[in-house]
Image (spheres, helix red, strand yellow):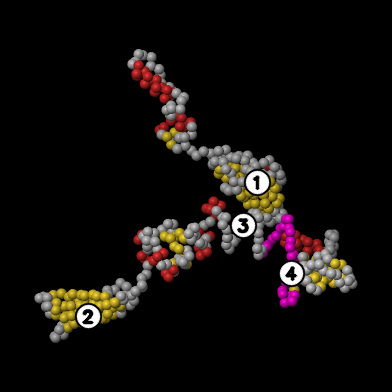
Amino acid sequence: MSSKLPFVSSDIPRDLRAFIDRVRELITGSGTNRIVTVGDLVSGGIAAQGPGGALTSPAAAVAPPATPTNVQASGAIQNIIVTWDAPLYAGHSHAEVWGSATDDLGAAVQLGMAPGAIFVDSVGPSVTRYYWVRFVNTQGARGAFNAVAGVMGQTGSDVEYLLDTLTDAALDPTSPYTKFAVRADLFYVVPEPTFNQEATPTATAVGDLWYQPSSDLTRTWNGSIWSSFSVTLPFVVNSTQQTINGVVVPPGVYMDAAYIKNGTITNAKIGNAAIDNAKIANLDAGKINTGFLSADRIQAGSISAAKLDTSYLTVSDASDFVGVGGAAADVNANTTTISGGKITSNSITATQIQTGSLVASNINTAKITIGVSSFGSYTNQVTDSNGQVLISQSISGGIGTPLFSVAVSTSSGAQAASIACSFLSSTSIGITVTLRSTTGAVLTSTTIPTIQIATF
């Protein structure tokens, strides 16, 4: 259907023709003041046309997948960790990781998918593999691979297996390999001596070494005398466990300082490590101390409540306030102890409870226990001259039982009993029961012993 208005050829008043021409310009014109139609909104991506011609929100913009950049493969002993720069195009869904034993994209197979920018390939030791990465958007469109040539990743050798192989070859007398062996319980490498001479030299610095050929002894200068060799050896091999000067030294290779360009370690115990960059396939840590772990680096599917030890979990804002149940209450983290699902009662004072933060709907009365002192029990009776009981009084203590009760006999003309209660002190009250006749005259009066009030 054309949006252009037909021209009016018949004679019409001048002012009406001017009006019609103006309407035609607004609808069919090309200026900035023309009327925008539904077709303009749909074609411009501003709106979409739903059932019955109704306007709806347009579908989210989805861009073609970009080409991955900075693809790298780092090998450990069992795993190769593939990383790349995070994609920035709109509508990204995931990345496909392809691999091959040779640098041939045609022979590569898809190894898996990753929603983020890292992929761990468990291949075992002594494996070389080439990798390619490409992105896929939410509409299922696949982009180009990062490159034609693959990125090589290589795992280290199984050190224990290699050591067993070397040991077997060393102990086999028929082995064709050239061998050099030092049969000693303690083998060490001595630094090059500073002085190699018979006569006592003049030392220039602490730690200077003097080797005397005739005695085959190496001595070190300690600042005042030449003494037996006592400097730290740079390299020592201890083949068996030994006790030296009361110190048990387990077997192993000891190095004072080591510079390793590429090392393969099956099991490591590190007292203090400074690492510029680490790629870890599996992390098991007692605790992580960091100010650089941001929420966007934690995938929601990776952490569940069962994996959080709340006894070591502290949540606080910049003012050291801990949020409990969202914004329902604020607890000062410096003075309040929360342990085992309860708050230690002597850790919270009235000044630390904000009345605007604690409402009745937030108090579970079933969980509140108020302690009271025991009142014990007491019974008293007032009788007339004939032994008729006029007043019977009782007191009992405890939660859920009456504090006191009064029974009045009407057989002796009594009309009513009145009860007077007064505070004797801040912690006790006194109760007096009076029996009056029908004329208002006092028949008898008795006082119940003092009741102590529990304080909290």
Mark carried by residue 282? 3
Magenta span: 243-269
Q: How far apart are marks 2 and 3 (CA)?
A: 79 Å
For the N terminus, the image quarter is top left
Of tags 2 and 3, the one toward the viewer is: 2
Q: Which residue bears the numbered disc 2? A: 447
Q: Which residue bears the numbered disc 1? A: 71
Q: Label 3's element?
A: loop
Crowd band around label 2 with a 10 angstrom C-alpha radius: few (<14), some (14–19), many (20+): some
- Is residue 155 rendered magenta in the image? no
Q: Which residue bears the numbered disc 4? A: 251
Crowd band around label 4 with a 10 angstrom C-alpha radius: few (<14), some (14–19), many (20+): some
In the image, residue 261 lies at what x, y percent? Answer: 73, 56
Question: In the displayed structure, does residue 257 sit left or right of residue 70?
Answer: right
Q: How far apart are marks 1 and 3 (CA)?
A: 21 Å
Whether label 2 touches label 4, CB < 8 Å:
no
| 67, 443: nearer the viewer | 443
User: Label 3 sits on what residue type?
Assistant: Asn
User: Label 1 sits on what residue type?
Assistant: Val
Q: Main secondary structure of the magenta part?
A: loop
Crowd band around label 3 with a 10 angstrom C-alpha radius: few (<14), some (14–19), many (20+): few
Task: Tell me the quarter of the picture where residue 262 sits.
Answer: bottom right
Of tags 1 and 3, the one toward the viewer is: 1
Task: Tell me the quarter of the picture where residue 432 sits.
Answer: bottom left
Nearest to N terminus: mark 1 or mark 3: 1
Mark carried by residue 43? none
User: Label 2 sits on what residue type?
Assistant: Thr
Question: In the displayed structure, does residue 17 sit left or right of residue 443?
Answer: right
